[in-house]
Image (spheres, rainbow, N blue to C red):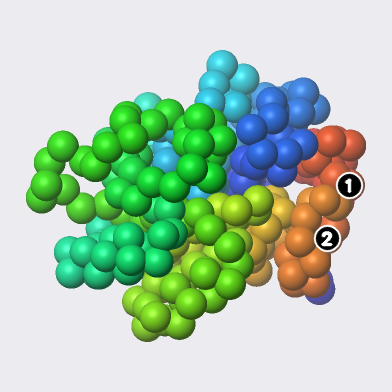
């Protein structure tokens, strides 16, 4: 693909296995340095994660994003975690998915604007829940509250059945290990990039995006320069403009230097 020739104004970064060497691991120090140098040059640093904006402990005190594309594009927030845009799930769909998961013993927790809440608990969830800032393992205290997106815990076979059952309404995306993102149809990290342009005027072609897994795919395709991590999925590497080194081997800063952004 032809490389971006416009001035880069923003760098968009996935977190798990992109800024970090793996899920629930600390941010790679060279990535921390890269973010600092980018902001010194006036380039915006945007975090784009399947996690909610209030639940990314690995970057706390190390990286200070200008904006967050959270919950795979369902929430767009500023540096102070103020929500600027949100896409709520349909009330009836919310109920139908919960009923289905309960019937088929699929774990599910939902991401709300103000916290994550468990709606169907299974034992396999414990390790995942421990890594998040969970408000509780209970349902949302406000029965009228609606989430923006969810996370499913189960087997790939179960997830295929969920996708078939709700194929017109949701996308089920492999998030690694036994966790699968549940996103509203048509919403992705690309959606957050569109909101970035609406709010700041920064266009997709003025962005570099880094990612490693399937929930990064649309963002990588949409960005002026889409970079796949060396440790990433083959699906991401196939559509990226450039495949850098792994996260653990300083892939982010190496790519930024290659494109003379740093």
Q: Residues within 10 Å of mark 2 (few under 14, many from 20)?
A: some
Residue named by callout 2:
242
Is label 1 in a helix, a strand or a loop? loop
At x 60%, y 27%, the residue is 58
129 vs 187: above or below: above
Residue named by callout 1:
245
Q: Does residue 204 show up?
A: no
At x 51%, y 49%, the residue is 50
Judge by depth and name the residue closer to the eye, 16 or 178. 178
Residue 214 lies, in percent from the top left, at 64, 63
Q: Quadrant of residue 35?
A: top right
Q: Does residue 140 show up?
A: yes
Q: Is residue 18 left or right of residue 64?
A: right
Is label 2 in a helix, a strand or a loop? strand
Q: Is residue 247 left or right of residue 174?
A: right
How many labels were placed on the picture? 2
């Amino acid at each position: 693909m032809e490389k971006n020739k416009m001035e880069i104004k923003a760098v968009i970064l996935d977190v798990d296995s992109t800024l970090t060497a793996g899920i629930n691991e600390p941010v790679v120090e060279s990535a921390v340095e890269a973010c600092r140098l980018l902001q010194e040059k006036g380039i915006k640093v945007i975090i784009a994660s399947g996690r909610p904006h209030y639940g990314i402990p690995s970057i706390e005190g190390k990286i200070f994003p200008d904006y967050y594309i959270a919950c795979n594009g369902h929430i767009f927030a500023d540096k102070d975690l103020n929500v600027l845009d949100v896409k709520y799930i349909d009330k009836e769909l919310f109920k139908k998915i919960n009923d289905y998961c309960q019937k088929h013993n699929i774990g599910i927790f939902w991401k709300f604007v103000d916290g994550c809440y468990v709606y169907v608990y299974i034992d396999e969830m414990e390790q995942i829940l421990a890594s998040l800032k969970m408000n509780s393992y209970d349902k949302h205290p406000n029965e009228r509250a609606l989430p923006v997106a969810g996370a499913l815990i189960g087997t790939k076979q179960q997830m295929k059945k969920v996708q078939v059952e709700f194929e017109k309404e949701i996308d089920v995306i492999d998030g690694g290990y036994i966790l699968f993102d549940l996103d509203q149809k048509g919403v992705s990290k690309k959606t957050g990039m569109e909101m970035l342009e609406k709010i700041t005027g920064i266009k997709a072609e003025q962005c570099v995006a880094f990612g490693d897994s399937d929930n990064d795919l649309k963002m990588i395709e949409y960005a002026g320069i889409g970079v796949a991590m060396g440790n990433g999925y083959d699906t991401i590497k196939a559509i990226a403009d450039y495949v850098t080194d792994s996260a653990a081997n300083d892939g982010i800063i190496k790519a930024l230097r290659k494109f003379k952004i740093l």
